[in-house]
Image (cartoon, rainbow, N blue to C red):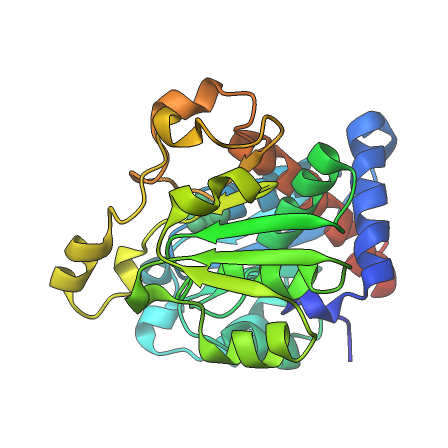
Amino acid sequence: MVRSVIDVLDLSTKELEEIIAVAQDIIAKPDDYADACKRKKLATLFFEPSTRTRLSFEAAMYELGGNVISVSSADSSSAMKGESVADTVKTVSCYADIIAMRHPKEGAALVASKAAGIPVINAGDGGHCHPTQTLADLLTIYREKGRFSDLTVGLCGDLKFGRTVHSLINALTRYNNVRFVLISPEELKVPSYVKRDVLKEKGYSYIQTTNLESYMPELDILYMTRVQRERFFNEEDYLRLKDSYILTPDKLKNAKKDLSILHPLPRVNEIAVAIDDDPRACYFKQVKNGKYMRMSLILKLLKEAGRI
Ligand code: CP
């Protein structure tokens, strides 16, 4: 079966480091890659809204000299008529060389990868995984800190539904001496399967707290997340929890001078715009890094599939 990436753990530590090395090379010498995917097509199938992920995949393919075909919303495709994910990707495989797919249902990308016959990249499946956001996060951490080990990482906000949080924890538990501070309201704690199967199973120390400020001085990385309205069944709960954490300049007074503030974006209220000019704000660098890591991943998967 052709290789797909559904979870960040589908990539070994060595492969992640190779993807980072190629992304750094693309940043340094973009012209060397300008024709790397000439006459190849990426299909972006997005059945859930997106700005960054879809456009960065598309920009990535154009910068590799390839082309893009796209479904940008569920209601503009035959999914609205009841077509299954498997039939959709079998069809798209007749037109494209590689697929990036976002879907509201957990497991949809895995189903697609089994039916497609061409590489499928999971661009987010419900509250489950978002591996290419993790690639963006990892390149950002690497470029800011020069390492993945010996870090105290604060994850703050919606840690229950935040698929980017689950993927990042999985990726960082491959490195030594990473300490996690899990900051969330009681109702939005990291799911117990992540604590049991990832953190405890691999012997990583973590702290669960509702209080961001008391742990701020210890953090090397602060990964803020949005409380996701679309994952709530009850609007009242969303309204009660949505502004649980709002990072303002005042709250950074006791933070390390070399703290790196990340956020997968979109942001709603959880980081004040006043922080954007703080040199510790890395979230727009993270957006840019996402494009380079997606370029590197597209190249890897198309090479392995024998398509370039
Ligand atoms: N970070 C992220 O997945 O953003 P989009 O939802 O805009 O793609």
**Viewer-closest of 288 and 31:** 288
Q: Is residue 242 visible?
A: yes
Residue under the point 52% across and 47% down? 53
Residue under the point 86% across and 63% down? 304
Q: Look at the picture and state if 289 lies above or below 155.
A: above
Quadrant position of the N terminus in the picture: bottom right
Residue 80 at what x, y percent from top left? 32, 70
Left or right: residue 36 compared with residue 255: right
Residue under the point 51% across and 80% down? 193
Quadrant position of the C terminus in the picture: bottom right
Q: Is residue 307 visible?
A: no
**Viewer-closest of 188 and 31:** 188
For the view shown, which residue lies furthest in the left direction? 236
Q: Look at the picture and state if 95 lies above or below 54.
A: below
Give residue 180's quadrant in the image: bottom right
Residue under the point 83% across and 65% down? 305
Residue 196 at what x, y percent from top left? 56, 81
**Viewer-closest of 36 and 184:** 184
Left or right: residue 213 compared with residue 187: right
